[in-house]
Image (cartoon, rainbow, N blue to C red):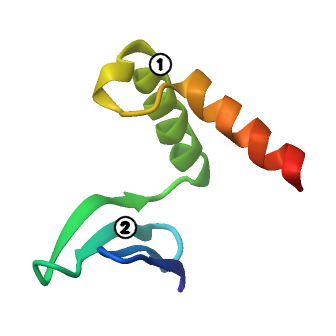
Amino acid sequence: SRGIEVIGETGSLEWRSLGKNPEDASIIWFDAGQNRKEILWEEKISCFDSMFENQLADVEKRQSSPELYGLRLDESIEALKIVESVR
């Protein structure tokens, strides 16, 4: 099993991965204020490459419809460049 949990002021975000072939993967938001959880993404991954294909497809969707995803891809890349320059 693998995973990571990011804890913030309003809640926490958890990525969890269990097993192999297929791998049960999920991303869950735990809202501290309302004491509830929301499954943001859940998938059985039988081919490791499919995870990257899905991520690439999501990036392409974000690029073609940036108004649906908050920061546009180019704005996100610029923000990452700033962070990298500080390191």
Q: Which residue is mark 2?
A: 26
**Residue placed furthest toward the top:** 64
Residue at 16% from the left image edge and 79% from the top image edge = 33
Which quadrant of the figure contains the C terminus? bottom right
Up-down relation of residue 40 to residue 11 (above or below): above
Distance between the alpha carbons at the discs numbered 2 and 1: 24 Å
Residue at 52% from the left image edge and 49% from the top image edge = 51
Up-down relation of residue 35 to residue 27 (above or below): below
Label whose residue precedes the other's in the sequence (2 or 1): 2
Indicate left or right for 20 with 32 as reference. Answer: right
Q: Position of residue 69 (x, y in %)?
A: 35, 32
Residue at 71% from the left image edge and 41% from the top image edge = 80
**Crowd band around label 1 with a 10 angstrom C-alpha radius: few (<14), some (14–19), many (20+):** some
Tag 2: residue type?
Answer: Ser
Residue at 34% from the left image edge and 58% from the top image edge = 43
Which one is closest to the eye, mark 2 or mark 1?
1
Q: Are marks 2 and 1 in contact (CB under 8 Å)?
A: no
Q: Position of residue 53 (x, y in %)?
A: 54, 37
Up-down relation of residue 68 to residue 38 (above or below): above
Q: Which residue is mark 1?
A: 63
**Crowd band around label 2 with a 10 angstrom C-alpha radius: few (<14), some (14–19), many (20+):** some
Q: Position of residue 1 (x, y in %)?
A: 53, 86
Total marks placed? 2
Give whichever of 61, 54 is nearer the camera: 61
